[in-house]
Image (cartoon, rainbow, N blue to C red):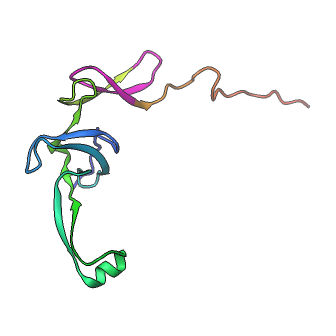
Amino acid sequence: MAQLQSKLKRGDEVIVITGKSKGQSGKISRVITATNRVIVEGVNLVKKHVGQREALRMGREPGVMQKEASIAVSNVMLKDPKTGAPTRVGYKVKDDGSKVRVAKKSGTELDTVKKAKGAAGKGAKTTKAKSK
């Protein structure tokens, strides 16, 4: 299976748009790019039976525990910071050359993906003249 890059990243607030957890929202705690899946806090909870030996290894009580299962990236959408509705994610290159993630519905800038190159002052290379 091909590894695809997701436009979503850890810490993004998302809404589940299909499946048994449809309509629920939460923050992404982990992105699994190898299988195109994400784990969202408090969403898609499954029950896992923990036996005596596994419980000792994990340092917890044996019995039934709940944990978050992964969800396909196609089944979640970013929650628009302005309106709270599901929105797609796009990219925009600013005049200074920096690349930012943008919510398509409201046009709100989410975060900077790539900083501008050749910013004056910071990180500018200086060459020293060699003296003989």
Question: Which quarter of the rendering shows the N terminus?
Answer: bottom left
**Seen from this angle, which residue lies furthest top?**
95
22 left or right of 98? left
Question: Which quarter of the rendering shows the C terminus?
Answer: top right
The part of the image, by quadrant, that contains residue 77 is top left
Q: Residue 116 in the image: state x and y as whole percent.
A: 49, 25
Q: Residue 38 in the image: state x and y as whole percent.
A: 25, 50
**Seen from this angle, which residue lies furthest front?**
61
129 left or right of 54? right
Residue 68 higher or lower than 83, as above or below: below
Residue 16 higher or lower than 68, as above or below: above
21 left or right of 107? left
Find out whether residue 87 is within the magenta segment.
Answer: no
The residue nearer to you, when weighing 5 against 108, is: 108
Q: Residue 15 in the image: state x and y as whole percent.
A: 18, 39
Number of marks present in the image shown: 0
Which residue is found at the position 23% from the left and 35% from the top? 78
The residue nearer to you, when weighing 72 against 17, is: 17
The residue nearer to you, when weighing 111 against 96, is: 111
**Seen from this angle, which residue lies furthest bottom?**
53
Which residue is found at the position 29% from the left and 84% from the top? 53
Q: Which residues are magenta?
A: 94-111
**Seen from this angle, which residue lies furthest right?**
132
Which residue is found at the position 16% from the left and 62% from the top? 46
Which residue is found at the position 45% from the left and 21% from the top? 97
Find out whether residue 108 is within the magenta segment.
Answer: yes
